[in-house]
Amino acid sequence: MKYRRFGRTKLHVPVFSCGGMRYQHKWEDLKPEDIPAEGQANLEATIHRALELGINHFETARGYGSSEMQLGWVLSKLPRERIIVQTKVAPSQNPAEFLERFDKSLRYLQLDYVDLLAIHGINNDELCETTLRAGGCMEVARQLQREGRVRFLGFSTHAPNRIIVRAIQTGEFDYVNLHWYFVNDLNWPAVLAANEQDMGVFIISPSDKGGMLQSPPATLVDLCRPLTPMQFNDLYCLSRPQVSTLSLGASRPSDFDEHIAALDHLDYATETISPIEARIKREMERVLGTNWIENWWKGIPDYDRIPGEINVLEILRLWTFARPLNLETWARSRYNLLSKGNHWCPGNNAGDFDETKLKGALEESPFADKIPNVLREAHSTLHGEPLLRLIER
């Protein structure tokens, strides 16, 4: 295992962290007797396999159902000094509710303290203000620090880049959990902003949200040889020293194996991935044109600044990577989370928009005339039954 400094926390975290979003029994709190013995045995084997590999950073959340309770049964038997534990608690208008949620997390984890506490889901301006206002959740979190129940504070986010950067530049946080990987390069300015603040950078779901790389299409498999698409994406992220760690949402012990094999190339990651990246880019340019691939995101406002709150930037991102790389299954899974009024997957799909008003909002884009037809094609190709996030199922 390789380790990196986690920003100003000065913790040294493994470049792969063990995420706790996929190995729990259910997405709701349960009584201990409702946890099947075989499911708990699998979780414990997954944790012990992580430790064998040198992965000592375990990440979960109050919103992950039985994850904290099941994880706590394992952590309580491990030497505390060997492990780094992160949980996440959603902000609330009522700080007392935030504290109550944290207390429950600590009880389930069977710990006296967590190394890392993230405000879970600073996804829009309102949630940022709720967190940071006088008397808000951040004041509660600071008190938890003074009491020794939390060591370092961060935030997780699915927000547009400008909101992430705004939260980072407050200087209030020690680290950030965000999305950034090959099929989502839009948050790179936020990664750089975090680096300027000496914050740790934790990449959320680089494999699943990064293209469903656990089951990649043949097109991408061929383009990424001799690596697998998952290994290419790992090295794409870790070739940047600004990135501290990637979350692996393991659901069984063997889920680490493909990632671990990528570490053989880490010391010369840039040289390894450069020809692969060039091949992928050539294929994307062949299908969509060089001008589009190099400029598609320019001049596109965030969804909350577009009539009808159409999430144009997200839809174009999905279409741009899905069409040339045959990633339609992944793109469909993301597209059909839109139009739910949910701040985790904000904005609307392209099923209904006023073209005249839309073009007015896109006047700074070099593709203002082309985008309406792209949105129609994306909707036709990707639209299906509305989907629920894992946490809502």
Image (tube, rainbow, N blue to C red):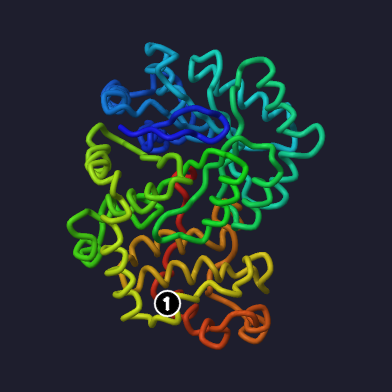
Q: Is residue 287 left or right of residue 157?
A: left
Local SS, label 1: helix
User: Residue 190: where, in percent of width, then height?
Assistant: 57, 52
Q: Residues within 10 Å of mark 1 (few under 14, many from 20)?
A: few
Instruction: Examine the image and state in which quarter residue 310 appears.
Output: bottom right
Q: Residue at horizontal 49%, vertical 45%?
A: 392
User: Residue 125: where, in percent of width, then height?
Assistant: 71, 52
Q: Residue at horizontal 69%, vertical 37%?
A: 172
Q: Is residue 150 above or below residue 296?
A: above
Disc 1 residue type (three-letter): Ser
Instruction: Examine the image and state in which quarter residue 53 appears.
Output: top left
Q: Is residue 116 left or right of residue 360?
A: left
Q: Residue at horizontal 21%, vertical 61%?
A: 221
Total numbered circles: 1
Q: Would residue 43 be visible to someone looking at this image? A: no
User: Residue 24: where, in percent of width, then height?
Assistant: 38, 31
Q: Would residue 251 be visible to someone looking at this image? A: yes
User: Residue 165: where, in percent of width, then height?
Assistant: 64, 52
Residue closest to the eye, 174 or 367: 174
On the rendered image, what quadrant is the N terminus found in?
top left
Q: Is residue 150 left or right of residue 252?
A: right
Q: Residue at horizontal 45%, vertical 32%?
A: 59
Q: Is residue 316 above or below residue 111?
A: below
Q: Is residue 191 above or below residue 319?
A: above
Q: Is residue 355 left or right of residue 326?
A: right
Circle 1 residue: 380
Residue closest to the eye, 24 or 189: 189
On the rendered image, what quadrant is the C terminus found in?
top left
Q: Is residue 128 above or below residue 284?
A: above
